[in-house]
Amino acid sequence: MEGWIVLGLILIVIAYLFGRIGFAVEEDKERSEYAKTNETIDKAINAEDNKTRNLVINTLKEIGCQPEVDDKDRICFKYQGEEFFIDADNDYLFVTLWDTWWLCVDLDNANVEHLKEAINLNNIRNIVSTVYSIDEDNKQMGVHCKAVILFVPSIINIGDYLKIVLDDCFKAHDLLKEQFIRLNFKQEKHESPRVVVKGFN
């Protein structure tokens, strides 16, 4: 009889241990399911954040800008007091950065042709393109900067990368002004009347 009692106690202890092990295994399965679900959710959130348009907005916020979306679905923001906008689409890896109407000149200004020539020279020396447009209604020529850049999450220090491109827009402004001054100086030099010295005609 004592053998049966000992055997019964051993069976109870074994059943208890198997029950605890089974419970622990079930609990681990539940935890792993939660972990898998959390991983899936994290991957989905990261994938959404890494889409081009969302990446641009998040990067602008990181560098201290306050991006807004206008009625034409462009991302608008100010950087160093200048208004910029970016055309970005989640289906593309490239974005187009615009700095529009940073300079306006009346079409009847005698230096319009020099400005056009300065724009062409400027585009040779800078990664940011400088373009002009004509506003026939207001009889003005507007000068704009444009940059088409790759914008993907694998770019290291993407905020610094964007700042460099934005700063290049300001460099384009300065280079255009320098080119314009040089062209005007050359014209003035060629237009100055010839000095006639007596005896050397």
Image (cartoon, rainbow, N blue to C red):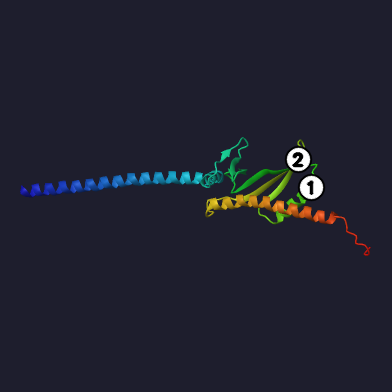
The amino acid type of the residue labelled 1 equals: Asn
* Residue 174 in sight: yes
Which quarter shows the C terminus? bottom right
Q: Is residue 2 left or right of residue 112?
A: left
- Label 2 SS: strand
Sequence-first tag of 2 and 1: 1
Q: Which residue is mark 2?
A: 140
Q: Which residue is mark 1?
A: 111
Which residue is found at the position 8% from the left and 47% from the top?
5
Which residue is found at the position 58% from the left and 38% from the top?
69
Picture coordinates of residue 178, whole percent (x, y): 71, 54
The residue carrying pointer 1 sits among few (fewer than 14), some (14 to 19) or many (20 or more) residues within 10 Å by Cα, namely some
Comparing labels 2 and 1, the label whose residue is closer to the camera:
1
The outermost residue toward the front is 198
The residue carrying pointer 2 sits among few (fewer than 14), some (14 to 19) or many (20 or more) residues within 10 Å by Cα, namely some
Q: Give 68 or 43, whichever is nearer the viewer.
A: 68
Q: Are marks 2 and 1 in contact (CB under 8 Å)?
A: no
The outermost residue toward the bottom is 200
- Label 1 SS: loop
Mark linked to residue 13 = none
Query: Where, by quadrant of the figure, is residue 135 drawn?
Result: top right
Query: Where, by quadrant of the figure, is residue 199 drawn?
Result: bottom right
Q: Is residue 80 left or right of residue 192?
A: left
The outermost residue toward the left is 1
Which residue is found at the position 71% from the left and 51% from the top?
177
* Residue 88 in sight: no
Q: Give 170 or 59, whichever is nearer the viewer.
A: 170
Q: Is residue 162 left or right of residue 31?
A: right
The amino acid type of the residue labelled 2 equals: Gln
Picture coordinates of residue 122, whole percent (x, y): 71, 53
Picture coordinates of residue 145, whole percent (x, y): 67, 47
